[in-house]
Amino acid sequence: MRVVDAHVHIFPDEIVAHRERFLERDFWFGQLYSPPRARLATAEDLIASMDEAGIDLSIACGFPWRDIGLCQYHNDYMAAAARTYPDRIAWLAIGSPACDGIARMIEDAFGRGASGVGELNADAQDFDLREPERLQPLVEVCIAHDRPVMIHASEPVGHDYPGKGAATPDRFLRFLSAYPDLRVVAAHWGGGLPFYELMPEVRLTTVNLSYDSAASTYLYDHSVFETTAQLVGADRILFASDYPVLRQGPILQKCRQRPWADDAVRAAVLGENAIRVYRLEEKFT
Ligand SMILES: [Zn+2]
């Protein structure tokens, strides 16, 4: 069984060693990483974690910097990590969607092997999912290259946490309906959007949407896996941890043990869906 963790975060060594240099350069980074207990991981930390957990491939994201120079710096790091570990690490390009030059930057990242764009964050990067036209240059590049965009999603209810934001299902749907041809992955179970897929008009808007399970343990009971599968279909669910927010081993174990219909469904959720959505087959050849 091929196991893919579809959503982890890695950072350049300099940021891991000297986070204090970046706390004031980016408001959202300061919000999340001022507490010293908020973990940061390098590519090497990730590989060690994957070896321990039994994960074949991880899809690495950077951080949703507002400054395009920091995005570029992070993309350079992830491209290098994927070159060092070509069969273990895939990566998503990060860009600040509203910045000038975003299309060229993402085009360049695809040329360097990025499997998609993400994790975009409306609150961190000063864009609004209710104004989807501002993201058009980025969206057009992704559609042209048939690559998905992974976007942070927020629960409109429940406890508050650093980084939660306001990318709630209603805003998410506004964005999806503007770009029906764009393939999108909603992080963290789409902030509860799967429930609204029971509404026929919502279902029509989400045909190109998948969900990842990042940070599940922080947010939901573990039955979220099979419950969401029942709501939207197991073929649209990607196993993901949000490492190093969560440890990969325990959440993988939990996901594996859920009462899936059969082994084919289990294999789809644990890796095959991510391989299809992010077009990762070449990583396994
Ligand atoms: Zn994340």
Image (cartoon, helix red, strand yellow):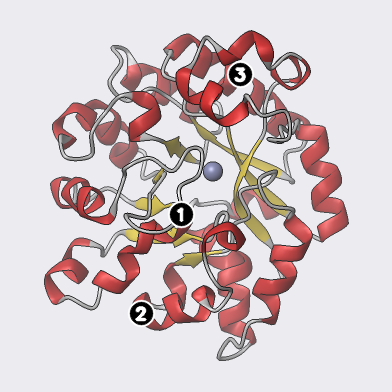
Report whether the residue tagged 1 is closer than 8 Å to ligand 1: no
Q: Residues within 10 Å of mark 1 (few under 14, many from 20)?
A: few
Q: CA distance from mark 3 to mark 1?
A: 35 Å
Q: Position of residue 115 (x, y in %)?
A: 51, 41
Quadrant where ligand 1 appears? top right
Marks 2 and 1, the one that precedes in the sequence: 1
Observer able to see residue 2: no
Q: Please, what is the three-letter code of the amino acid marked with disc 2? A: Leu
Q: Which residue is mark 2?
A: 231
Q: Position of residue 162 (x, y in %)?
A: 51, 38
Report whether the residue tagged 3 is closer than 8 Å to ligand 1: no
Work out whether 193 lies above or below 282: below
Kindly state the secondary structure of the residue where label 3 is placed. helix
Name the residue: 61% across, 18% down. Answer: 76
The answer to which of 81 and 152 lies nearer the viewer is: 152
Q: Which mark is residue 201?
A: none
Work out whether 91 lies above or below 172: above
Q: Which mark is residue 159?
A: 1
The number of callouts visible is: 3
User: Residue 22 is drawn in which quadrant?
Assistant: top right
The answer to which of 31 and 118 lies nearer the viewer is: 31
Q: Please, what is the three-letter code of the amino acid marked with disc 1? A: His
Q: Which mark is residue 76?
A: 3
Observer able to see residue 159: yes
Marks 2 and 3, the one that precedes in the sequence: 3
Q: Please, what is the three-letter code of the amino acid marked with disc 3? A: Asp
> Do residues under tags 3 and 1 come within 8 Å of each other at their CB atoms?
no
Name the residue: 66% across, 46% down. Answer: 245
Kindly state the secondary structure of the residue where label 1 is placed. loop
* 111 relative position to 174: left or right: right
